[in-house]
Image: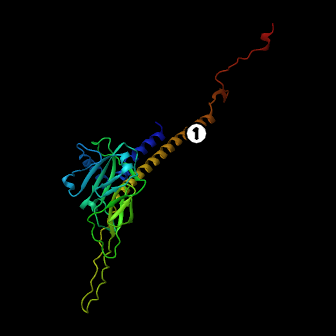
Amino acid sequence: MGLLGSLAVLSLICFSLLPDFKAQSASRSPARALDALLQDYAFRAFVRPKTGIPYDGTVPSNLTGIKVAAIRLRSGSLRKRGVPMYKEFRIPSGVIDKPYVERLVLVYQNLGNWTQRYYPLDGYTYLSSVLGLLAYSASNLSATNLPELDIIASGDPISIAFPDVKSVPDGSIPKCVWFDLDGSVNFSNVLSGNMCETMQQGHFSIVVESIAPAPAPAFPVSPPGVPPNVAPPPPSGKKKKPNSKIWIIVGSVLGGLLLVALLSLFILWVQKYKQRKRMRQMEKAADVGEALHMTAVGNTKAPAAMVTRTQPILENEYVP
């Protein structure tokens, strides 16, 4: 394996130490995890199901207060006739499902006193529980963690009539809120009779903007001889940022990559240095050449060849 290959392997090893941010961001939110759990318990209500009849499910004891139900329908029947009354939902004709399935299940949710926990909404106060309507394929009624189907009202909208709505505070205007499956929040006007409308599935409720608390009064002027109130000093300890560990890991990985790069450059420099040194030795040997042998001629020394390649021949030796 060459130097570049080793560097690539080391880089992959370093990057493998990074936390899987994508997996964390794509992990299910508590609300989406609750949808998967309630789908399972709603499907358990189908013992000997009949098409078009809703069945109430039973949730575990740790979710007491949440209500679920399920109704199995034919896609063609849903599109042609709709469902006149399914709990608080009125589903008109013209509702289609994507992708198309022959039979589907509409799961009903009423989160009750768990509304604020799974759907917190800053700046707003809930006047009713969050109601949910989600569609699933009915091809396997014992399946869990099923993906939702997309149901869209192509004609009249789906209406939701909310019961037991709290009274609206003076000066507040109630709003319909819709949480889609991607986590987006959408607001619309409340219709007469505490009714909201939607063209798609999701979770719904009625809310009002929270009334901001009155500003704190200024410090009163202290009478003579009484020291004024002194605000408590700010806390000395600095709050540690929640993502400090992530930056420490990122910094460590980047530092490791920089060290690998410097080490690679040093190895390349050493190889180049050895090559240049070898070239200088070869050039020096070529310049010096082979030394001539010295021989004594009288009182002096002169260079002399060790071997004579061609012996001298008199010309008359070839005369016939």
Q: Is residue 210 above or below residue 283?
A: below
Residue under the image location 28 percent in, 87 percent down: 220
Q: Is residue 23 left or right of residue 282?
A: left
Residue under the image location 35 percent in, 64 percent down: 176
Q: Is residue 30 above or below residue 267?
A: below
Q: Is residue 223 above or below residue 197?
A: below
Residue 183: x and y in percent read 37, 57
- Mark 1 Cα within 10 Å, few/some/many (few <14, many 20+)? few
Residue 10: x and y in percent read 42, 43
- SS for callout 1: helix
Q: Nearer the viewer, residue 51 or 242?
A: 51
Q: Nearer the viewer, residue 252 or 245?
A: 245
Colour pattern: rainbow
The residue under label 1 is 280
Residue 123: x and y in percent read 34, 69
Q: Is residue 97 left or right of residue 47?
A: right
